[in-house]
Image (spheres, grey):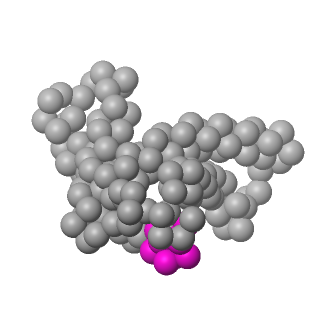
Amino acid sequence: MTGRYETSIDRAGLALGAGSLMLGLVTLLLLLPDGQYGAQSLALGFVLGTLIGALALIAVAGPLWLVLHVAGLRGPVTAALAGSVLTLILFIGAQTHGFRLFDAAAPAGDAALFRWVSALLTAGLLGIVAAGIALAMWRIAYHRR
């Protein structure tokens, strides 16, 4: 499967731009249910989500993509799994205080269980969204040789 798909720097840049815009849209959609934001706040949320999303894609997903690309793992399943697993690790770690490594006061039994269940469910939902964004970015970045 090595070399079955190829890309170029311009296609990778377009994919990065599209992924950043999709992350901005996700940010906007997360602000909508609250209902107390005006158009200016929603626009700011979209812009900040896009910019921070671009930084995250470059700093976190970029090195992983480079390793997978060089290793010849360039298919759509790999892209979706990479986006999903990376998101799961980041968001579960963030919600559990670094997988309980940095938890000053460890919660008691039931509280810890509920924290982990909540982290798994919310990160799982975000992982599904991330897999979709990764697939869209893959489709833009790669074409068959």
Q: Is residue 65 above or below residue 17?
A: below
Left or right of residue 26, residue 37 in this image: left
Viewer-proximal residue, 93 or 8?
Answer: 8
Q: Is residue 35 above or below residue 110?
A: above
Residue 100's quadrant in the figure?
bottom right
Q: Residue at x 36, y 25 (%)?
A: 34
Viewer-proximal residue, 135 or 116?
Answer: 135
Question: Whole-percent x and y of residue 14?
Answer: 23, 58
Does residue 68 belong to the magenta stretch?
yes
Question: Whole-percent x and y of residue 119?
Answer: 65, 44
Left or right of residue 34, residue 40 in this image: left
Q: Is residue 60 visible?
A: no
**Residue at the outermost right position:** 109
**Which SS type dominates the magenta stretch?**
helix
Residue 66's quadrant in the figure?
bottom left
Q: Is residue 35 visible?
A: yes
Question: Whole-percent x and y of residue 144?
Answer: 39, 57
Q: Residue at x 61, y 41 (%)?
A: 124
Q: Is residue 56 above or below residue 72?
A: above
Q: Is residue 145 above or below residue 22?
A: below
* Extent of the magenta region: 65-73
